[in-house]
Amino acid sequence: MKGRVALVTGGGRGIGREVALLLSAAGARVMTVARSSTELASVGLDYVAADLGTTEGCARAVAETERRLGPIDLLVVNHGIGSAHEKLVWEQDPAVWRETMRINLDAPFELARLTVGGMCKRGFGRLVFTSSTAGEKAERSGSAYTASKHGVIGLARAVAQDAGPFGVTSNAVLPGWVRTEMAERSARTSAEQRGITVEQVWSERAAIYPQNRVLEPREVAEVIAFLCSDAAGGVNGEAITVALGGIW
């Protein structure tokens, strides 16, 4: 991985931050992208603040990475919006649907479109998309999030078919519950709605899994980092669940 150029979105915190640090430790030159300059600066790597919910933001992230670090070899699409603000489908605000798709699905397409052609020309590339266990199973009051995460898996598999003949792999990682800031927001929302504590929500989430705990961001990041490596060349078009053996 030494000398490879990596673009990691959602790189200011949680899983993305851990991925960026792992790739950097393995010798990659890493650009982290998110909306918060403060969070990105705290990672200690190159960064560009951009709104990836816009085509302009995606283009800026790619262009800045290539200008400052060189052609992109590794693309980790990890940013996203959660479902804490969603409602039952018949009560869902169409604006919520559109915002979720813009961030969770349109941006991954734009980032892949802007980078994978160059990877194919150079004969090497790795794309890893963070989906969710909701990418294969549905959650209540989460039509937009569930649909977007299903779509991310389809996108990863489509890119795998297009780019596979050129030495480029594309895979999706499907985490279960991870104690990130986004998941904390959904826990607070659930706790308020049900009149229980946030810790009770997390205890219920932990009980889903045989180890009676939720994931740490580093555990998901390790899988993503492996998929970015030369050793993962035989893994393509896969949706890999990282969920402690749980059924959700």
Image (cartoon, rainbow, N blue to C red):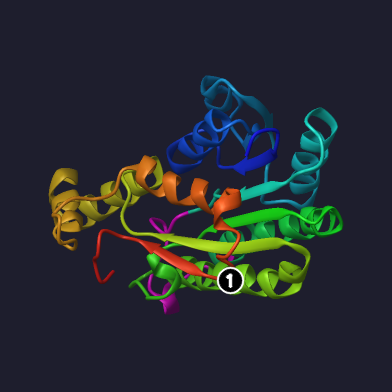
Image location of residue 22, percent across then percent down: 50, 35
Front in this rendered view, residue 143 or 170: 170
88 inside magenta stretch: yes
Image location of residue 245, percent across then percent down: 24, 65
Query: Where does the magenta region start and end?
Result: 82-95
Is the residue 38 above or below the residue 197 in the image? above
Secondary structure character of the magenta stretch overall: loop
Q: Callout 1, which amino acid?
A: Gly
Image location of residue 81, percent across then percent down: 50, 53
Q: State the quadrant of the N terminus.
A: top right
| Residue shown at the point (67%, 41%) measured from the top left | 7
Residue 136 visible in rendering: yes
Front in this rendered view, residue 235 or 243: 235
Label 1 packing within 10 angstroms: few (<14), some (14-19), many (20+): many
| Residue shown at the point (80%, 54%) measured from the top left | 114
> Which residue has dot 1 on it?
237
Relative side of 189 to 101, left or right: left
